[in-house]
Image: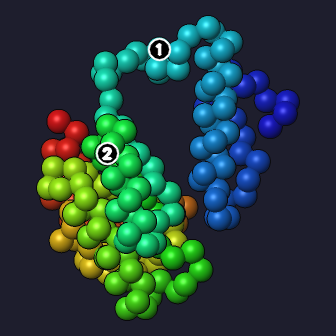
Amino acid sequence: MLPHCPINVDTAPSPFPRGRRFFSSAVSAIDMALWDLKGKHYGAPIHDLLGGAVRDRIWLYANLGLCEDPTEARERTKAAMLMGYTAVKFYPLPPVMALETPAAYRAVTACCEAVRDELGRDGAFCLDFHGRCTPSVAVQMEAAIRHTSPLWIEEPTAPEDVGALQRVRKIPNRGRHRRALQ
């Protein structure tokens, strides 16, 4: 990458082999850095380089991070709401435990129920599975938490695994995302 001109963002070669864990995150970080350099070079905000602003305000959520304990999830949600957030995102999967067990499904469900209870009907929450699930686990996990109405599940499977993403894309969204952003 070093001899590459950072202004030519779209033609930047990737220093990472495809199919490796965290490939997408690494490429995304490099892409953002290149766009930042391009914006600094031209003295313009990146949204101007991409064609201009498309809205004058955006909706933000608080990222609660790894949160596998329902009490902690509730406390972090309450703290976010006190700061003015109406939505939160968290990572509910146990860091080292197998995900295919009934205990894992119950733990994730309990966290989602605690967050939903704290937010109320009108609050929104999102989940990040960090690509740790197989397609079958992602589908079963979503079915276990569907009653809590998460807004979305980020990276239900590894983002590099297009086949896995195609298998889980049939998870019902029921238009929650669009409604929440209006």
Packing grade of label 1 (10 A; few <14, some 14-19, many >=20) is: few
**Residue 48's mark?**
1
Q: Is residue 153 in sight in this rendering?
A: no
**SS label for mark 1:** helix
Q: Which residue is mark 2?
A: 81
Residue depth check, mark 1 versus mark 2: number of the one nearer the observer: 2
Q: Name the image quarter holding residue 31.
A: top right
Say what amino acid the circle numbered 1 marks: Asp
**In this figure, what is the number of numbered marks?**
2
Identify the residue shown where x is 32% and y is 81%: 140
Identify the residue shown where x is 43% and y is 73%: 69
Packing grade of label 2 (10 A; few <14, some 14-19, many >=20) is: some
The reply, left or right, for residue 14 in relation to residue 175 is right
**Residue 133's mark?**
none
Q: Relative to residue 70, is residue 30 depicted above or below?
A: above
Q: Is residue 77 in sight in this rendering?
A: yes
Say what amino acid the circle numbered 2 marks: Met
Relative image position of residue 128 (x, y in whole percent): 44, 60
Q: Name the image quarter holding residue 9.
A: top right
Q: Nearer the viewer, residue 34 or 89?
A: 89
Relative image position of residue 170 (x, y in whole percent): 26, 68
